[in-house]
Image (cartoon, rainbow, N blue to C red):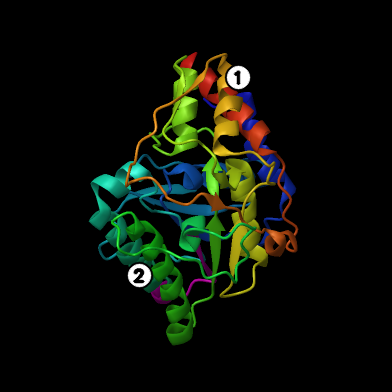
Amino acid sequence: MISDLELEDIKLVADELNFDGFKNKTILISGGTGFIGSFLISVFKYRNEKYNDNIHVISLSRKGGIDFENIKNVKCDITKDINIDDNIDYIFHLASNTHPKQYKEDPVGTILTNILGCNNLLKLAVQKKVKRFILASSVEIYGQGPEYPMNEMYSGYIDCNTARSGYNESKRVCEALCQSYNKQFGIDFVTARFSRLIGPDRKQDTKAISQFMDKALANENIVLKSLGNQLFSYCYISDAVKAVLLIATKGVSTEAYNIAGEFDDMTLCDYAKFIANLANINVTFEIEDDDAVSKATYALLDCSKIKKLGYKPSFSIKEGLRRTYIIRKSWMNN
């Protein structure tokens, strides 16, 4: 049972956008039980129930799941050949190791999941002659950004001589793979370069903002492991899904689009204090050097390009954090 606020988020995306391109189509989503994938499926499910869009979803995940009307859950390891009998119109490739703890404990698996998974799904796209392949990439491909918002033409700098760089570099390879499949096989694709995402996620998440939220919900002081001077772009989950749907339908083939909310001139420490205030707790500091943590101190995205498609975030980052806190608090009480 989802909360009223969660339903409000889903309806906001489902009612605002034009879904004509997805009606009566079959959409495959890798990482269907993940943060973005599960929200995206909820939007399609709502469209089917309210608007009779007859959108068929094939959700790939490591554990699979129970099928529902128009939603097929398939247990799948995307690093191996993927066999699907159904016709497929769109592929949203959202599966990836996305947490710092995973980078640290399984750097090899992080790289191979990204590269082999992307290649296998692109091979499936060729086989099924899909209308469009949507790749989920990341702000991480820019590495340590300059001290101004980065647009899609910025090449970035990544120190490849660290295990932590495996995620960044493999995401870059995935983007290059898509370009290669377009050149060699004519695959139509677009790339969504997501900023750091916030929102209620039922899975364990080791990113900084999620750890702050965990502490707040446990009524424990938030612990910062740096001074918190970092300036990063963030995006609330419903705005991120709205953006990727816009890219899927309106984006220019072979091009990448940055996805972020509006920057509100707050540092990581400012966000920690904002979350702490929601729970009436404090922020403390335990400075340490962790090679699983991004060394970027400035990673702001210029979203001018996607705004030309009609993208406008519905929520500020502070409002997104407030909604996250309220929703996750409701989970604890149910």
152 relative to 280, above or below:
below
Residue that label 2 marks: 119
* Residue 48, numbered circle: none
Horizontal arrangement in the rendering, residue 60 relative to residue 221 (left or right): left
Q: Residue at x 39, y 28 (%)?
A: 286
Q: Place residue 304 in its image quadrant.
A: bottom right
Q: Position of residue 297 (x, y in %)?
A: 51, 49
Q: Position of residue 312 (x, y in %)?
A: 74, 50
- In the image, is residue 127 part of the stretch drawn in magenta? yes
User: In this orientation, which residue lies closer to the viewer: 253 or 107?
Assistant: 107
**Amino acid under disc 1:** Asn
User: In this orientation, which residue lies closer to the viewer: 201 or 66?
Assistant: 201
Residue that label 1 marks: 277
Horizontal arrangement in the rendering, residue 98 relative to residue 50 (left or right): left
Is tag 1's residue or tag 2's residue first in the polypeptide sequence?
A: 2
Q: Element at badge 1?
A: helix
Res. 78 visible in picture: no
Inter-mark Cα distance, 1 to 2: 45 Å
Q: Position of residue 65 (x, y in %)?
A: 35, 41
Res. 1 visible in picture: yes
294 relative to 156, above or below:
above
Residue span colored magenta = 126-136
Q: Residue at x 46, y 18 (%)?
A: 221
Question: What count of labels does the image hold?
Answer: 2
**Amino acid under disc 2:** Asn
- In the image, is residue 76 part of the stretch drawn in magenta? no
